[in-house]
Image (cartoon, rainbow, N blue to C red):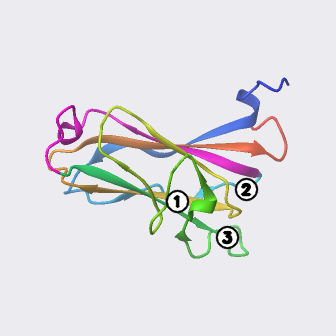
Amino acid sequence: MTMRDLHNNVAPVQALPAQTINQGTGALNTGAVDLGGFAGAQVVVHYGEIVEMGASPVGGAQIAIRLEHADDNGSGAPGAFADATVADVTGVASVAAGVVATATSDLVPTSFGYVGDKRYVRVTLTPTGLTSGGPVGVIVNKGHPRHAPAA
């Protein structure tokens, strides 16, 4: 493996299959993503066409992206989730109550890194002002495997 080889050093997880988000669906979350055997992750939230977040957003249409993490509870399952802090995340300017980013435009993915020391992460997407809404999904790229290749 060469130093430029990402394929053998990243394991993507479809944490939230693309689905419609709007005020009717309410918040969507990925459930627990197990990072066991990996020392970090990159979270990518991708959007389809969301009318209220298009070129001319209607009002305050947005999606708040919250990251939580948890230790193993001793039986290979997540314990209590807590909000990630700015020390646990890369690629963002601040973290407030676990909210690492707020998306206000569609068709442009939001990504950030997780460098915390917990085994499990969970992403929650909370819509505001999305009457019609549109598709959204989450990919978690587990990285820095303890043993490569990261198959």
What residue is shown with label 2?
36
Q: How many labels does the image show?
A: 3
Mark with earlier residue (3, 1): 3
Query: Which x, y percent locates residue 122?
Result: 52, 59
Does residue 93 appear in this view? yes
Dot 1 alpha-carbon crowd within 10 angstroms: few under 14, some 14 to 19, many 20 or more: many
Query: Which x, y percent locates residue 66?
Result: 44, 59
- Comparing 11 with 69, the one in front is 69
Magenta residues span 38-59
- Comparing 92 with 146, the one in front is 92
| 31 displayed left or right of 74 | left
> Callout 3, which amino acid?
Asp
| 44 displayed left or right of 50 | right
Disc 3 versus disc 1: distance between alpha carbons? 12 Å
What residue is shown with label 3?
71
Residue at the (76%, 38%) spot, across then down: 150
In the rendered view of the protein, which quadrant contains the C terminus?
top right
